[in-house]
Each structure stands twice: as structure tokens, then as C-alpha cells.
Image (tube, helix red, strand yellow):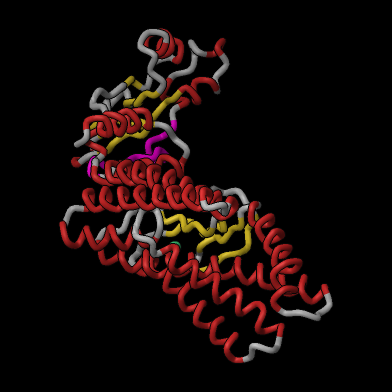
Amino acid sequence: MNSGIKLGHLWGIPIRMHLSWLVIIALMTWSLGAGYFPEEFQSYNSWVYWGLGLLTSILFALSVLLHEMGHAYVALHYQIPVKGITLFIFGGLSEITEEPKTPQAEFFIAIAGPLVSFGLALLFGGLWLFNKQFIFLAAPSEWLGRINLTLAIFNMIPGFPLDGGRVLRSLVWTATKNVKRASRVSSIAGQIIAFGFIGIGIYIILQGQLFNGIWLIFIGWFLQNAAATSFAQIGLRYILQEARVWQVMSRDLPLVPGNISINELVNSRIIIGGRRFFLVADSATNNYCGIVTINEINGVAPEDWKKVTAGEIMMPCDKVLEVSPELSLMEALQKMDDKNVAQVPVRGAGNTVVGLLSREQVLRYVRTRAETRV
Ligand SMILES: [Zn+2]
């Protein structure tokens, strides 16, 4: 999700705009400047309409950003990191990478966005009431007041993945003390609402309103997809947050002595066995002191394999990323991602290496858990 134009930083959060928003702003400027404004406010120069159209579109983009900042602000308040805010195809997207730990946090993070939109609706509505004759004030504020009210109401529809779905989930979570059941309820509500949109869309088309009907079906289809995907993602996230490294790591340590030659390592452990990651033990003390991977081996010319030892090319263990057995899979994966490594030693109590964790193992574990419905 790193695509798009960088707009700046706020509270340490990068704010981006997906390129689709240039199209949205252009279309909106056109529809307001050439259609809506000239009809509502007659007898102005067409430059005025186009200028107001552009201004209103930009303020609309800003309104969507403020909605997302509402979510982000409360998330940060609950110490949940926000990786970025992006103006994305249908609206905004806050990349809140962790699930809230309490239903209260979930409730306030979710409701903050619609509250901001509602506040903006009041603000623009007030400006509109203040002077309905002055076009430079009345035209943008009337439209922005209405669209922000629509945003607030639409987002409060109680089904996943909309904000209202998260509010619903937090309420069911509080009532049942069971976050998984709450997610399921909210996701099912989301799918019912999505099919409701599609049904009403079909009904409206049969009544002869083709354009509005297609719109509703499109929104319904989008919501249905999003509800299904986000439910799957939440399931995945819970597995990753609940499971610990020790549950997944392999305890079979590929320990090799530091004085083994690369030639022997390749012949006895890679060609036979297919390992790609080795823990190197100090030849004297037999303690783990570094790692050798395919990368290090590929750095040595094959004609030197007989002369060079694992101890000479290893990455010393003070430079190696290690994880503890009690870490959640989520945190372990994030660390591996940051350092761009596929495998890490697991260092347990007593300062000994007790296992190895690889991305492949995590993937296999998550897949198995998802299949067994536990
Ligand atoms: Zn929202």
C-alpha cells in the first residue's frame, strides 16, 4: 500500500494519496463545475463554477482525510501504531496494523471517524446557514455539509468492514466477552447489508432507475467483498497474535562446527538434506556463535570452498536477529520483515538457542490452524 503521492506527515504518520484520487477530484470538479453549481446558483461566469468545483473537491478530499485522522488519533491514544493514512479508491484507509485489545478501544477508534464527519457536516451546514446568497460560501458549504453527513451515516451502517460494523463488534464483544463471536456477528451483518444493497439496487433497476440501481449494486458488491476479506484477515491476525514462537519453531538445530569447510557443508548438509540455514558452533566451546546461510556461501568462489571454513564466513551472532520463544508470531514476523530475513534463531532462557523459526513454518502453521477451526 505504499503507492501514491506523499502529502506529508502528521503525528509521525505518513499521509498519502492514491493516484485514483486525481481522477476522483477531476470527475468531481467536472460534475460540480459543469452540472450541479450552474443549476443551483444561476448567472455566474463559468470560471466561478469551475473554480468552486475544484475548491469543493479538494475540501472533500480533506474531509475524508480528517475522518481517517479521527481514527488514527484515537488509535495512537490507545498506543496502537498507525503505519499510514492513504486516500484510497473509495475513501480513506488508516493502516492500523494491530487489533484493539479491548472493546472500549475498538469502540472509540471506530466511532471517531464518523464523529469527525458529523462535526464537519455541522460546520459546513452552519456556514451555509450563515449566508445562503454569497455563492463562494454557500455553494461549497451546502454540498460539503451534505456529503459529510452522508459519509457519517454511511459509515455507521452496522456491518463489517464499515466503522459501524466495528462499533457493532465492540458492543457484541462487551456483551459476550468473546471477540471471535463478535467478529463473526459483525461480518455476517456486513454481508446481509451488502446483499440488501444489491437487492434494493435490482428493485430500483426494475422500477426504471438504471443508473442509481447499478450504483447500489456496485456498493453492495464492494461491501460484500470487503466484509469477507476483512473477516478472513481478522482471523489470521488473531492466530498470529495469540500463537507464540515456541509453538511453531523447529527444535531440530542445524548446528555445524566452526572449522567445517564450505565444501563439506555443501556436500553433507545442502546437497543431502537441502538445508539453507546453519547455526555455527565455536569449535572449542561448542557454543553457538553465528549463522551461515546460502547467501554467505554464495559469496565464496567454489574453487575456494575447500580452504574456507564456516567460522570464517559466518555472520557473528551479535549481528543476527534473534527472537524469544514467548514472542507472538505477529511480532516475530514484523521483526523478520524489518530485517528482511526468512529465518531466525530462537534464544530461550539460560541464554541458549532453543529453536529456529522460519516464515515458511509460520505460513504452514497459520494454514493448518485456519483449516482446523480452533
Ligand atoms: Zn472510518
Residue at the limit of the structure toward the front, as seen here: 207
Residue 74 image position (x, y, % from top left): 38, 69
Left or right? Give the position of 13 relative to 106.
right
Q: Is residue 370 visible?
A: yes
Residue 368 image position (x, y, % from top left): 27, 29
Q: Is residue 229 above or below residue 12?
A: above
Residue at the limit of the structure toward the left, as seen here: 176
State the residue in front, 134 or 233.
134
Count the labels in the image.
Answer: 0
State the residue in front, 217 or 130.
217
Residue 28 image position (x, y, % from top left): 67, 63
Q: Is residue 287 visible?
A: no
Q: Is residue 321 magenta?
A: yes
State the residue in front, 188 or 268.
188
Residue at the limit of the structure toward the bottom, as seen here: 130
Image quadrant assignment for residue 243 = top left
Q: Quadrant of the C terminus?
A: top left
Q: Is residue 147 above or below residue 269?
A: below
Image-quarter location of ligand 1: bottom left
Write the residue at 72% across / 79% down.
Answer: 41
Write the residue at 61% across / 53% down.
Answer: 18
Write the residue at 39% across / 14% down.
Answer: 274
Write the residue at 32% across / 49% down.
Answer: 187
State the residue in front, 112 or 310.
112
- The span picked out in magenta is 315-326
Q: Is residue 215 above or below residue 244?
A: below
Q: Is residue 355 magenta?
A: no
Q: Is residue 164 above or below residue 322?
A: below
Residue 119 image position (x, y, % from top left): 47, 78
Image quadrant assignment for residue 240 = top left
